[in-house]
Amino acid sequence: MIKEYIRYLKDNPQGYWFKARLYGWGWAPAKKEGWIVLAAYLLVIIVPGLFAERYIETGEDFLLWFLPLIIISTAVLIWICYKKGEKPRWMWGPPDKYKIKR
C-alpha cells in the first residue's frame, strides 16, 4: 500500500504541489512546496493558540481573535491547494495503473 502511494505521488509531470488524496476528497502534499505550505498553516494555527492564554483574558475575546484566524488561514490553504494542486475528486484507493500486482 505504501509503495503504491509513493508511486502515485511521484508520478507528477505537471509539478503539482498537492495531489488528490487516495481515500476521500481533498489533497495531500506531493512536493516540498506543498509540505512547506502545510507546515506554515499549522504554525499559523498552533503558535497563536499557545500564546493566546497570556494575552487574551476572556473566552469571547479568544473567539473574536482566534476564530477569524482559523477561518482565514484555512480559506487561504484551500485556495493554494486548489490553485497549485490536482483537481480534487472522490477516490477510494490508488488508480489501477499504480497498483502493484501480487
Image (tube, rainbow, N blue to C red):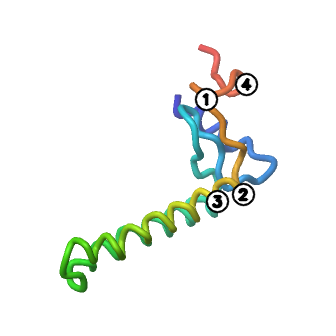
Q: Residue at x 64, y 41 (%)?
A: 20
Q: Position of residue 88 (x, y in %)?
A: 66, 41
Q: Read off the residue under disc 2.
A: 83
Q: Residue at x 36, y 76 (%)?
A: 65
- Label 3: state its secondary structure: helix
Residue extending farthest to the right is 13
- In this view, the mark in front (4 or 2): 2
Disc on the earlier residue, 4 or 2: 2
Amino acid type at mark 4: Lys
Q: Position of residue 80 (x, y in %)?
A: 65, 61
Distance from label 4 to label 2 (Cα)? 25 Å
- In this view, the mark in front (1 or 4): 1
Mark 2–mark 3 CB contact (< 8 Å): yes
Amino acid type at mark 1: Met
Q: Give the class, few, some or many, for how many residues have Cα within 10 Å of label 4's Cα (few <14, many ≥20).
A: few
Residue extending farthest to the top is 102
Q: Residue at x 34, y 76 (%)?
A: 48
Distance from label 3 to label 4 (Cα)? 29 Å
Disc on the earlier residue, 3 or 4: 3
Amino acid type at mark 3: Trp
Amino acid type at mark 2: Lys
- The circle drawn on residue 91 is 1
> Does residue 20 lie above or below 47 as drawn?
above
Residue 67 occupies quadrant: bottom left
Q: Is residue 42 left or right of residue 86?
A: left
Distance from label 3 to label 1 (Cα)? 20 Å
- The circle drawn on residue 97 is 4
